[in-house]
Image (cartoon, grey):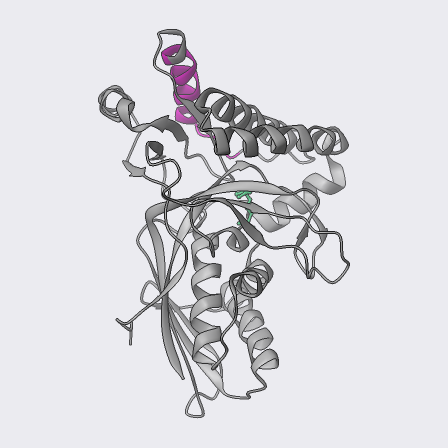
């Protein structure tokens, strides 16, 4: 009753920021991401009578509080479906900084859903796995699949139609790249969960945001299928800045940016004027992710070297789905 899975992080091109159901983690709007090759979480889960309680170890440290509670909730869900009683040991390793706006929760939630369900003896399909991952962390519903993925908001009250559905596979657009800049690897002050709840409750523009989403979704879906880089980049960038406008106008304001975040945004706008076509997107953290094509990677990397305050960069292709692997962490 032991299994190990690996899942990639993802970055949203159309963002999720607000739940219509907090318990089941159902979003107000559908959203679209690209799975990122190389930014991943590996998770081993073992259900066994020898464990008196559920244990969660992340990057070698035993977790308590909220981190542990989230994992326990997912284990409870799986125990219920599999009709087992055994407690579990869960060990996870991220190959990138946790909770710094790099969607570590997405890779973690997807790896946990795949490893734990397999360890419990279940053989679930991608939709069922995505629903379990969603209940761990919303964006995790998109990391079960590879390539470009839409988390359908769904209509039903029980969440049975709210899951990550592939728009195009990881091999569809091989030139597509995301460059993740790491400006600070410190954990953020306002986590996504309370942050988005505050926005829904207090931001005067939340309804206006929702009113623009369908058009953004349509444009991005079409741009992915037609590999129209300009439309994809423009729409994703506009959608990201709209989400940050919501965050800034939440009461109290949620500002995830560092001075370097704005500096890179301004550089990207300038580079575009100079004919270097790339776009930015930013999640709940200071990191700027640059949306670009393979042919411009060298030039962008060269220009980023001149920018102060960048601790690290990761160049990512569209990544594959979450999968089981043989090497166990314990
Ligand atoms: O799923 P969470 O709780 O990690 O929230 C993700 C929120 C954003 O990253 C800001 C947007 C998104 O769609 O990934």
- All told, the count of numbered labels is 0
The picture places residue 11, in percent across and down from the top left corner, at 46, 41
Residue 270 covered by magenta stretch:
yes
The picture places residue 151, in percent across and down from the top left corner, at 59, 48
Ligand 1, seen in the image, is in the quarter at top right
- Apparent side of residue 316 relative to residue 132 in the rendered image (left or right): left
Residue 182 in sight here:
no
As drawn, which residue projects farthest toward the bottom?
Answer: 49
Quarter of image, res 16: top right
Quarter of image, res 199: top right
Q: Is residue 142 above or below residue 326?
A: above
Tell me which residue sits at (35%, 33%) in the image.
Answer: 177
In which quadrant of the rendered image does the C terminus lie? bottom left
Q: Is residue 185 above or below residue 328?
A: above
- Apparent side of residue 137 relative to residue 114 in the rendered image (left or right): right
Residue closer to the observer: 43 or 164: 164
Residue 112 in sight here:
yes
The picture places residue 140, in percent across and down from the top left corner, at 51, 54
Q: Is residue 205 above or below residue 1?
A: above
- Report the predominant secondary structure element of the magenta stretch: helix
In which quadrant of the rendered image does the N terminus lie? bottom left
Residue 216 covered by magenta stretch:
no
Span colored in magenta: 256-271
């Amino acid at each position: 009753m032991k299994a190990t899975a690996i899942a990639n992080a993802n970055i949203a091109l159309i963002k999720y920021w607000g739940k219509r159901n907090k318990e089941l983690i159902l979003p107000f709007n559908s959203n679209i991401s690209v799975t990122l090759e190389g930014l991943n979480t590996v998770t081993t889960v073992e259900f066994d009578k020898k464990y008196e309680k559920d244990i969660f170890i992340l990057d070698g440290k035993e977790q308590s509080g909220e981190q542990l509670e989230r994992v326990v909730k997912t284990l409870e869900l799986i125990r219920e479906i599999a009709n087992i009683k055994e407690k579990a040991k869960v060990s996870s390793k991220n190959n990138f900084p946790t909770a710094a706006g790099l969607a570590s929760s997405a890779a973690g939630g997807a790896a946990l859903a795949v490893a734990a369900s397999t360890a419990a003896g279940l053989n679930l399909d991608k939709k069922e796995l995505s629903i379990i991952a969603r209940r761990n962390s919303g964006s995790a519903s998109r990391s079960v699949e590879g390539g470009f993925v839409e988390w359908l908001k769904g209509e039903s009250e029980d969440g049975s139609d709210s899951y990550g559905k592939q728009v195009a596979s990881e091999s569809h657009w091989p030139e597509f790249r995301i460059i993740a800049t790491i400006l600070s690897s410190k954990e953020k002050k306002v986590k996504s969960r309370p942050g988005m709840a505050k926005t829904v409750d207090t931001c005067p523009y939340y309804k206006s945001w929702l009113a623009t989403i369908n058009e953004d979704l349509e444009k991005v879906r079409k741009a992915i299928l037609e590999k129209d880089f300009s439309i994809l980049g423009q729409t994703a960038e506009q959608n990201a800045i709209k989400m940050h406008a919501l965050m800034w106008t939440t009461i109290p304001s949620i500002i995830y940016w560092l001075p370097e975040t704005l500096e890179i945004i301004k550089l990207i706008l300038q580079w575009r004027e100079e004919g270097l076509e790339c776009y930015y997107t930013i999640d709940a953290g200071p990191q700027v992710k640059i949306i670009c094509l393979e042919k411009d990677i060298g030039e962008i990397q060269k220009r980023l070297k001149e920018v102060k305050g960048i601790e690290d960069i990761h160049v990512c292709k569209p990544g594959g789905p979450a999968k089981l692997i043989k090497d166990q962490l314990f």
